Amino acid sequence: MAEADPSSRVAPGGAARAAGRAVDRITVALAGNPNSGKTTIFNHLTGSHQHVGNYPGVTVEKKTGVCHHRGVRLDVVDLPGTYSLTAYSTDELVAREFVIDEHPDVVVDILDASNLERHLYLAVQFMELGLPLVLVLNMSDVAAAQGYVVDLDRLSGLLGGVPLVPAVGNRGQGIDAIRDAILAVATGERALRPVPITYGRELDREIEALTAALEPEASRLAPRRPRWVALKLLENDARIRERVERVCASAAEVLAATDAAVGRLRTILGDAPEIVIADRRYGFISGACQETVRSTVELRHTRSDQIDAIVTHPLLGLPLFLGLMYLVFWATFSLGEYPMQGIDRLFQWLGEGVSGLWPQGSPSALRSLLVDGVIRGVGGVIVFVPSIGILFLAIALLEDSGYMARAAFIVDRWMHKIGLHGKSFIPMVIGFGCTVPAILATRVLENRRDRLTTMLVLPLMSCGARLPIYVLLTGAFFAERWRAPVMWILYLVGMAAAVLLAKLLRATLLRGETEPFVMELPPYRAPTLQGTLLHMWQRVWMYVRKAGTIILGVSVVLWALSSYPKPPAEVAAGLAPPARRAAALEYSVAGRIGQAMEPVTRPLGFDWRVNTALVGAFAAKEVFVVQMGIVHSLGDGRTDEPDLLHQTLRDEYSPLQAVAIMVFCLLGFPCMATVAVMRSESGSWKWALLQWAGLTVLAYGVTLIVYQVGTALGIGAG
Ligand code: GDP
Ligand code: MG
């Protein structure tokens, strides 16, 4: 009761003061699902001052009551009980329009703590509206009797710092704590962080686009939250559509854009956006509860829960994840082989065709440019499209089914230990495709330290462009059954290095607290054909486009560097063609650069030819395989069969050298595009250069150890 609290007998006019904001009157809206104990709490809160009556202007009855707490007057409005804030029922609309139009200072949401996940659904919607919120975990007695234990601090942290007040309404327990929490939120003493729920790549992109379109109208919108309005439009909310139509100057365009977006989403997601949005909200809640609510009694219901019991199991989860990853690499190899041979033959045929336009043995520079520079350069990269396609198809399937969220959840536990959280895992998975979009994806991390740490270690996630290097070298040096394991280990080494480096960074340069985040666990859904193919295609297309642009350009430049200057005639005289070729290459600019680097790279087992290929790989990692082809065959005017290149590599290098090269490419020298995007996303050259130099030094050190120890032990000496 208000009277029972001595502090509420402060002289009238006394005001709560905190965070520089003085308040003497607060409007409180009381919300909650039906039967959560709202009326009970309302009666306790307002006590004998209760004034019951029809709230003016709406048809549904709303009670209002008044009480005083620490000298502040609280006007409490009891909203109708609702499950959600959609426009499906009158009760929900009344509740929503009250909070949107009447601007209560604080919303108090009463939750049934024994049924927390379901009741949080409404709370999350209030959070999305950006309202000052207090959550009351009512029925705490029931929850405790059923064996639930909630980590309140942790849950509050995950929900943006919202106050969580346990209460037992029918016994009047927790009522003063609720009043205190209301004051703390209203005065700003307790600041709430926004908690953006991620709705998945497609939805987030459409939400962002619509938000941008609504931004100029923000002052006319109620509430003034373009993002919320955008979300509601995508949820096909008739009321919000009407509002937009009424107040927005650009309503016609916005609504047309909405309809187009909804159409696209339906195709890709295979469901109406509002269903997927609801799923993702539940996923957010389910993730938050998995981390913070312990049940001493086993209570698992839905199929998603049953699958999760295995997939996110503390012991089984990780081996399962590693096993799936292994399967993916196995598929990349075994299924990719045949189409690769086909594409290879196609480019070979093209090369021979173009070559045949000149007489046999002609020293034409143009012929060499077309055949060795252009066709070999582009072909050498396009050949890996099937491998890349299979890898990306697998990633798309895992992402779209909801498994990737579980993988993030599993690693979250480990990530916390190294000072990152599972949210960093999403950019890392994207990093398996390409580091550039992965760095852009770190924007989901709000804390700059978290973001920088993640960005800095991202190049260690082995990107698609490095796959050709592994495929070429493991293909040449390892028996078929060892190829997938070797790749798998390489990827794991990269991930382990990322983890260790992140830990090091968090302990030194980027020390600080990690912000709590919810790992969303959306329910599993069958991926749609369109969605999966689209996601795969977007990434494959990026790779193909790169082959036609950057790689084409780099190949031509490298061809020129490897061809000029030509050695004087007396050098070549008397040499057999292969030796003449080697002499010409040694004489060229690329050859000289490679030789100049030899003293540095010799301890790693690299000769000058590998060095020239590494210089090319800085432009784009795929170029390594192209340049290895060029340095081992340039000048004879015909493209080599891959088997021949394999044979040449086997003749000239040992398996240990191949491993050293792969390790160096895995860990070291992020490509040009990565350096550029690091600069723009981190805002300075400092981080971009630090990353490049740091990773290259790391790669050098690790490769040195691998090669020297391997040599000393006589492993893989060929
Ligand atoms: P409303 O529909 O949200 O207004 O819920 P009511 O206030 O009418 O409460 C529904 C029922 O739950 C009533 O019988 C209350 O006595 C009971 N109740 C309310 N709070 C608690 C609580 O904390 N613990 C228990 N065990 N029962 C409660
Ligand atoms: Mg009631």
Image: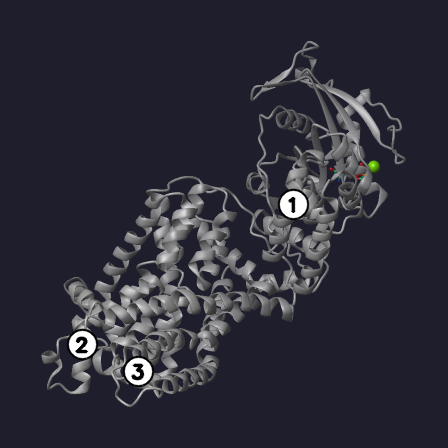
The residue tagged 1 is: 213
Q: Residue at x 60, y 26 (%)?
A: 188
Question: Which circle marks residue 646 in the picture?
Answer: 3
Q: Is residue 605 above or below residue 108?
A: below
Looking at the picture, tell me which residue is in the foreground, 360 or 485: 360
Looking at the picture, tell me which residue is in the foreground, 118 or 187: 187
Q: Give how far apart the Cα atoms at labels 3 and 2 are.
A: 22 Å
Q: Amino acid at mark 1?
A: Ala
**Residue 592 picture location, percent across and down:** 17, 67
Q: Amino acid at mark 3?
A: His
Q: Is residue 376 above or below residue 105?
A: below
Q: Nearer the viewer, mark 1 or mark 3?
A: 1
Most extreme residue toward the bottom, as rendered?
360
For ligand 1, tell me if the residue under mark 3 lies within 8 Å: no
Q: Give how far apart the Cα atoms at labels 1 and 2 are.
A: 60 Å
For label 2, the SS is helix
Q: Is residue 499 visible?
A: no
